[in-house]
Amino acid sequence: MSGPNDSYDPKEVAALSDDALSGAVDAGAAAFAAAADLDALAEAHTAHLGARSPIALARRELGALPPQARADAGRRVNEALAALTAAYDERHVALERDRDERVLIEETVDVTLPWDRAPAGGRHPLTLIQERVADVFIAMGWEVAEGPEVEAAWFNFDALNIPPAHPARETQDTLWLDPPEAGVLLRTQTSPVQIRALLERGAPCYIAVPGRVYRQEALDATHSAVFHQLEGLAVDEGLTMGDLRGTLDALARAMFGPEARTRLRPDHYPFTEPSADVDLECWVCHGTSTEPGAEPCRTCRSEGWVEWGGSGMVHPVVLASAGIDPQRYTGFAFGMGLERTLMSRHDMSDIRDLVEGDVRVTAAMGREA
Ligand code: DAH
C-alpha cells in the first residue's frame, strides 16, 4: 500500500499548470473581447466557459488530486474561472448596452409620419363654393357681408316689403323661436342682409352674402330644413337691369366656365320690381334638346335652361326701409340656392349627399366644387 502522495505537484498535471490556466484565461478574454455581438459572445462562452472548455476540463482534473494538492489547484482554477467569468460578464454588459441603444434607434416609431390608411377626406363642397363665390365678387370690387342666422322678423320680412298677412310668410315655412310673439326666427333667406348692409354702409353698396338659411321642411331627396343661399345686392346711382344681367353673366362664367349663359324670366318677388327668375343655359345640351327630333336632355328636361335663382330691381319701399333715398339710388339684387347649384353642376339627384357629410362625397367633390 502506498502512502499519501505528499510530493504530488498539481502544476505538473498539464491542464492545471500555471501556463495552461493563464493561457485559458487569455484565450477566453481575447475571444470575449473579439465577439462582435451577443450571438458571437454566446459561442465564445461555450468554447471558453462551457462544459468542454479548457477551464472545465481543468476543474474535472481536481477530483483526481490528493487533498493537499487539491486546495492549491482549486484556488488557482477558481481564480482563472473568476477572471474568465469577469471578462465574459464585462463584455456581455457592453454588448447588451450596444444592442439596446441600437434597438432604440432602429425601432423608433415616428408618430408624426402620415398614416396612409387614414383617409385624407376633403373640405365640404358647400364651404368651397362659398369661398369661390366670395372670390368672384371680391375680384369685381364687391364686399362680402354676413348677417345673423337668428333674425328679427322685421329684417326677414317687413323691411323686405313682406307685411304680416303676406302669403310669402307661409310659403317660406318659417321656423319661429319661442315665444312666437317675440318675432324672432331662423332666417328663411339671405335677403335680410340686404337691409342690414344698407343700414350699416349706406349707398353706394355692393355686397355678396353667402350664408345658411332655414325652413320647416322634412329632409328628402330635394328638400332640407337647412340649406345655403348666395345673395347679391348692388345699390348706386343709375344702376339698371343691364347691370344685373352683366353681373349674373359674370358670376355664371366665373363659376361654370366661359360658355355659361343666363336668361331672365319674369316672376314676382315682394322685394324687387320688376322681378325675374334667373335661368342657366343647360350645360349638357346647350339648348339643342329643344330642337325638333333632337335627343331628350335629362338635365334640363329638354327645356334648354335650368332654373338658378331669383332677381330683380330693388323695390323702392325696400330702399326706403333701409334709409336709402329711392329718388337718387336704384339697385339690383339676386339670390340663388347653393345646394341646387352644386347638385345641377355635379348631376346629383339627392340633396342628402350634401347634408350628411359622408367623407366619400366630400373627398370626391371637395376639390372641384
Ligand atoms: N330670397 C329669395 C328666396 O329665398 C330669393 C331672391 C329672389 C333673392 C329675388 C333676391 C331677389 O335678392 O332679388 O326665394
Image (spheres, grey):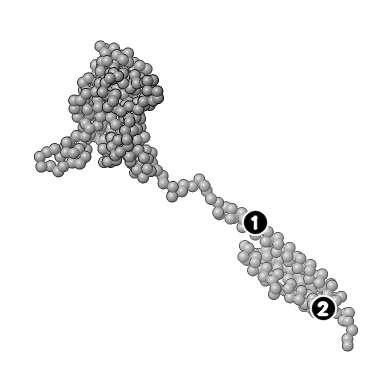
Task: Answer few, some or many: residues within 10 Å of disc 2's Cα (few below 14, many 20 plus, some between 14 and 19).
Answer: some
Residue 273 in the image: state x and y as whole percent.
22, 19
Q: Type of residue at label 2?
A: Leu
Looking at the image, which residue sits at the far left?
292
Using the rendered image of the protein, determine whether residue 70 is visible from the camera's viewpoint: yes
Q: Quadrant of the C terminus?
A: top left
The answer to whether residue 363 is left or right of residue 341 is right
The answer to whether residue 366 is left or right of residue 83 is left
Residue at 67% across / 71% down in the picture?
Answer: 47
Q: CA distance from mark 1 to mark 2?
A: 42 Å
Residue with the mark numbered 1:
97
Secondary element type, mark 1 = helix
Q: Type of residue at label 1?
A: Arg
Residue at 26% across / 21% down in the picture?
Answer: 166
Q: Say if 237 sits above or below 114 in the image.
A: above
Q: Say if 173 sits above or below 15 in the image.
A: above
Residue with the mark numbered 2:
65
Of residues 337 and 40, the one drawn nearer to the viewer in this rendering = 337
Secondary element type, mark 2 = loop
Of residues 5 and 207, the one drawn nearer to the viewer in this rendering = 207
Using the rendered view, name the quadrant where residue 357 is placed.
Answer: top left
Residue 155 in the image: state x and y as whole percent.
34, 20
Residue at 19% across / 34% down in the picture?
Answer: 305
